[in-house]
Image: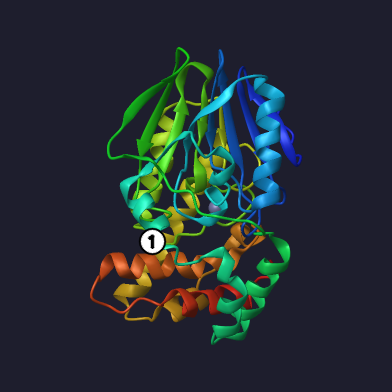
């Protein structure tokens, strides 16, 4: 099969399966998926801001004709995967119970991004939040939350096409779900899969993240739509597993030797993975491994972690 181009907007992946890409897939620039069957439509993740979500909604109309979006799946609680839900209000909106709870906390309310920037103690986080405020448009934004939660592997049917929802969290966040369309050989992986960039492990455990990648490989998909970056083949997922395993082993060794998270970060030789965008995100993965090994040990907070990650990142 020819590789799917990684161009902004709508791209056909397989019969009735499409991806909406936001290159280069950096912070906040996430992919969405569309599954069309008969006169029914399912959308996976709804983009980060108002113009992007409107673009996705218009793209759905382009491929689905009169088909209405009956179902939305939010793969997890990061804003770049659900802030566009208002354009699909009225649809059945599914997420894991953990993700739905996290969304309702609205810890990173996009309407308050300038205030959050002004309140940030660190310069790196302040600059980053101001950059995000410039980059994304939340005029007339309102939160629309999931209407139903997924607690175990389950199947739904979109006009005769089976769609499997497979919870795999906590991994990237507290509650991640992977969407599989078996008869089309397509997986919409959300942020379990990053391609050409370094995965962000907000919560871990990293071992769950690896297990989720192995589970996707076992599905033997033809195409995996990543959360950020181009479509992944099996080799791309294997590479991600190898990377996460390398980080897990390094961090475990440094933990046993008594190093701090920062020392473990500074002593890590990333090898070829240094070429992945946002390579300093590995600090947060190390932080997650430390929390996994000793839940009592104080983890670096979001602000502390971002200060270190962003100091080495040019977005
Ligand atoms: Zn994301």
Residue at point 64%, 50% (across, down): 196
Q: Residue at x 71, y 41 (%)?
A: 55
* Quadrant of the image occupied by residue 301: bottom left
Which residue is more in the foreground, 205 or 61? Answer: 61
Residue 232 appears in the figure? no
Q: Residues within 10 Å of mark 1 (few under 14, many from 20)?
A: many
Horizontal and vertical percent for residue 193? 52, 45
Q: Quadrant of residue 256?
A: bottom left
x then y, percent, for residue 122: 56, 85
Q: Residue at x 66, y 67 (%)?
A: 132
Q: Is residue 234 something one can see in this rendering? A: yes
Of 157 and 295, nearer the camera is 157
Residue nearest the viewer, comparing 251 with 158:
158
Quadrant location of the N terminus in the rendered image: top right
Colouring used for the render:
rainbow
For disc 1, the marked residue is: 203
Residue 128, position as x, y percentages in the image? 64, 73
- Could you tell whether 224 is left or right of 150 in the image? right
């Amino acid at each position: 099969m020819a590789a799917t181009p990684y161009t902004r907007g709508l791209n056909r992946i397989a019969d009735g399966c499409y991806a909406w890409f936001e290159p280069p897939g950096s912070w906040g620039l996430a992919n969405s998926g569309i599954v069309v069957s008969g006169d029914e439509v399912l959308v996976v993740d709804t983009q980060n801001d108002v113009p992007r979500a409107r673009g996705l909604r218009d793209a759905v109309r382009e491929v689905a004709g009169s088909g209405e979006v009956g179902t939305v799946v939010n793969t997890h609680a990061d804003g770049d995967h659900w802030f566009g839900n208002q354009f699909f209000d009225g649809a059945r909106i599914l997420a894991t119970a953990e993700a739905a709870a996290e969304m309702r906390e609205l810890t990173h309310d996009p309407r308050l991004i300038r205030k959050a920037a002004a309140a940030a103690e660190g310069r790196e986080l302040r600059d980053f939040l101001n950059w995000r405020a410039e980059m994304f448009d939340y005029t007339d934004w309102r939160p629309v939350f999931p209407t139903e939660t997924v607690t175990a592997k389950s199947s739904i049917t979109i006009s005769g096409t089976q769609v499997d929802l497979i919870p795999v969290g906590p991994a990237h966040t507290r509650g991640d779900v992977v969407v599989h369309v078996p008869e089309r050989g397509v997986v919409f992986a959300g942020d379990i899969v990053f391609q050409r960039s370094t995965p962000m492990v907000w919560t871990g455990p990293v071992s769950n993240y690896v297990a989720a990648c192995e589970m996707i490989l076992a599905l033997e998909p033809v195409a995996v739509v990543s959360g950020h970056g181009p479509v992944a083949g099996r080799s791309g997922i294997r590479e991600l597993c190898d990377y996460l395993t390398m980080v897990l082993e390094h961090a475990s060794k440094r933990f046993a030797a008594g190093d701090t998270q920062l020392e473990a970060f500074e002593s890590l030789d990333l090898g070829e993975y240094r070429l992945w965008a946002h390579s300093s995100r590995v600090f947060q993965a190390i932080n997650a491994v430390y929390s996994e090994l000793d839940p009592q040990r104080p983890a670096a907070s979001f602000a502390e972690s971002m200060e270190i990650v962003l100091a080495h990142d040019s977005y």
